[in-house]
Amino acid sequence: MNPFTSAQVPTTDCTRYGLSADDSRAHPHTVTLPTQQTDEDQTQAGALGALQQSFTSHGTTSRYHVVDGGVDTSRPVGLVVDLHGDGGAEYTEPGGRTTCLAAVAASHNDLLVVPLTPDCTGDCTWWRDLRPNLRWLRALVTQRLLTDLPVQEDRVSWIGYSGGAEMLSYGVLSGARDLVTGGAAMVGGGGSPGSLMSAADEQQKKALKMWWFTGADDDGTDPDSDFDAVEAATRGQRFYEKRGFEQTRLELLPGHDHFDMPDAAILDELLGAQDAQPTTSS
């Protein structure tokens, strides 16, 4: 059963995340956290999906969601890792953006994983305790996700919003690029790390897609968002471009701010670019 096309469950409106109203993915079934102990699936996480899974590495523990919108395991399956913004709403409230990203991922035969940062002392953030969080994230991908899920190592894409975009540019793309085989999209942020944690090889510089998308109005003047994402994204893109990465891209979207970005459409474009690349069996 495909949880995104079955009847009698609530749906999510994904037009707010950039999908057109007539897109077959625009109204997927809403992914929800379980509310009671039952053998029935309350979550709409799909056949390969599982919410609130725990993972521990070197004494550090956090959780993650896997959402399967109906992938076909007889074909190559990819993986999308979504890094949440500060506060972790994409993890704690999966019925909105997470549901829409999962529907888009499934249309490209990809599973969606949403990890929760281990650093939830106060506001949950990826970037404040960046290096320990990055070590946990690397272990999650290599020791759990690529081991337990039927996904190909050459089809791992990433997307991050706001603080998650910062984690991508400061952490993953700086020091864990080997985990990014399908490209990365940073939405509403993604600043310059100042220096790379690890040297880049020529193949990474030539082929690794690094895309920044930020609302043109997301400049820190909004009382509800004093983070200047335009400056952060501009500095981040320039940093990687100056270090020889050939597939960087910066888009400042007119009429958009920090809270109305077309994340689903952005992911769709990123995965479409990955689909156009030849893949190998794993």
Image (tube, rainbow, N blue to C red):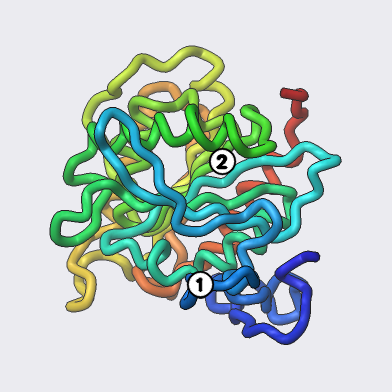
Amino acid type, mark 1: Gln
Q: Earlier in the sequence, mark 2 or mark 1?
A: 1
Q: Quadrant of the C terminus?
A: top right
Q: Secondary structure at mark 1?
A: loop
The image quadrant that residue 265 belongs to is: bottom right
Amino acid type, mark 2: Ser
Q: Is residue 119 above or below residue 45?
A: above
Q: Nearer the viewer, mark 2 or mark 1?
A: 1
Residue most toward the left?
A: 122
Label placed on residue 203: none
Q: Secondary structure at mark 2?
A: strand
Give whichever of 221, 63 is nearer the camera: 63
The residue under label 1 is 37
Label placed on residue 157: 2
Give whichever of 235, 104 is nearer the camera: 104
**Image x and y of residue 243, in percent:** 37, 23
Number of numbered discs on residues: 2
Please report the residue visible at 46 percent of the width from the left and 51 percent of the height from the top: 53
Q: Are marks 2 and 1 in contact (CB under 8 Å)?
A: no
Residue 201 appearing in the image: yes
**Image x and y of residue 90, in percent:** 42, 64
Please report the residue visible at 59 percent of the width from the left and 76 percent of the height from the top: 30
Q: Quadrant of the N terminus?
A: bottom right
Residue 233 appearing in the image: no
Q: Is residue 148 above or below residue 203?
A: below
**Image x and y of residue 4, in percent:** 72, 70
Q: Give the Cα separation between the discs numbered 2 and 1.
A: 33 Å
Q: Viewed as shown, does residue 87 lie left or right of 137?
A: left
Residue most toward the right?
A: 74
**Image x and y of residue 25, in percent:** 71, 70
At label 1, counting other C-alpha atoms closer than 10 Å, the crowd grade (few under 14, some 14-19, many 20 or more) is few
